[in-house]
Amino acid sequence: MWTRVKQWWARKEQSERPTPWLDVAEQPLADSVYWVLDLESDGLHPKKNRILSIGAVTVAQQRLQYGSSYYRLLLYRGKLRGDSLLIHGLSPSELAKGKESKQVLHELCEQGQDKLWVGFHAGFDAQLLQNAFWQELNWSVRPSIINIAEYLPMLVDESADSHNTLEYWANYFQLDGVGRHNALGDASVTAELLLVVIAKAHALELYTWAQLNERLKQWRQIRLHLQPSF
């Protein structure tokens, strides 16, 4: 009984520790510092699969800071399915030389401290990180990650709703991240798309994430209203 109480209290303390990412609510679009990340996993089920690699790059003063780029392979000795190998291209021999997950998660949070975290279809990455934080650090928290994919159809091309993928936008803007398709290359492409979103938002006289999110909410309501009913 006492052991369970101690475990519960340790987890409570972990869940109440400060989070490294900033709250997006009233942060400015242009003057914020961003931590743009991408994860590769051993499958596409966010609640079951594990993180294999993490890439991240800082965006500050509306520039990619490649000098602070971050890329790590995580130690992994499990079996990899053929379809996941085709997606991420990471071999078992490479992953067997990776770093311990706890160390990588600590590094990620340390370098992402006091920044806005950004991803593409970021809900998947947020769930993977939430699971990893709990399993490796006994930390019950879901990362706050801006999902840049939400804004691009509204700001650039409404028809992209049906094919709103990183590959589509990379081709659309002719972006070529370093080392694509690994996590760092995809993170750099996502960072370039973040700069596109900021520029397009400014053209509409939107200067904070709160303003941009309010415009996105209105846009979605209008589109829903205009959809034909059968």
Image (spheres, helix red, strand yellow):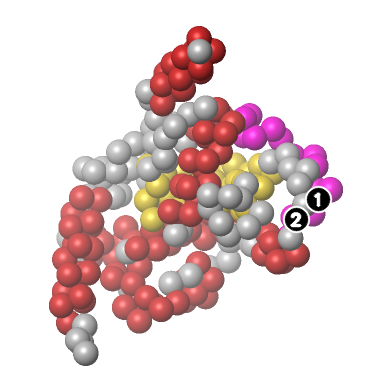
Which of these two is toward me, 24 or 84?
84
Q: Which residues are magenta?
A: 89-105
Q: Which comes sooner in the sequence, label 1 or label 2?
A: 2
Residue at 34%, 36% in the rendered image: 22
Residue at 63%, 57% in the rendered image: 43
Q: Mark 1–mark 2 contact, CB under 8 Å?
A: yes
- The location of residue 15, given as percent across then percent down, is 41, 26
Residue 59 visible: no
**What is the residue that sits farthest to the front in this orientation?**
1
Real-space Cα separation, disc 1 to disc 2, in angstroms: 8 Å
- The location of residue 46, given as percent across then percent down, is 53, 53
Is 203 one of the magenta-colored residues? no
Q: Is residue 60 left or right of residue 202?
A: right
User: What amino acid does circle 1 point to?
Assistant: Pro
Residue at 73%, 39% in the rendered image: 75
Q: Quadrant of the C terminus?
A: bottom left
User: What amino acid does circle 2 point to?
Assistant: Leu
Q: Which residue is mark 2?
A: 80
Total numbered badges shown on the rendered structure: 2
Which of these two is toward me, 75 or 214?
75
Which label is found at residue 92?
1
- The location of residue 79, given as percent across then percent down, is 77, 52
Q: Helix or strand or loop: what does disc 2 sit on? A: loop
Mark 1, other Cα within 10 Å: few <14 / some 14–19 / many ≥20: some
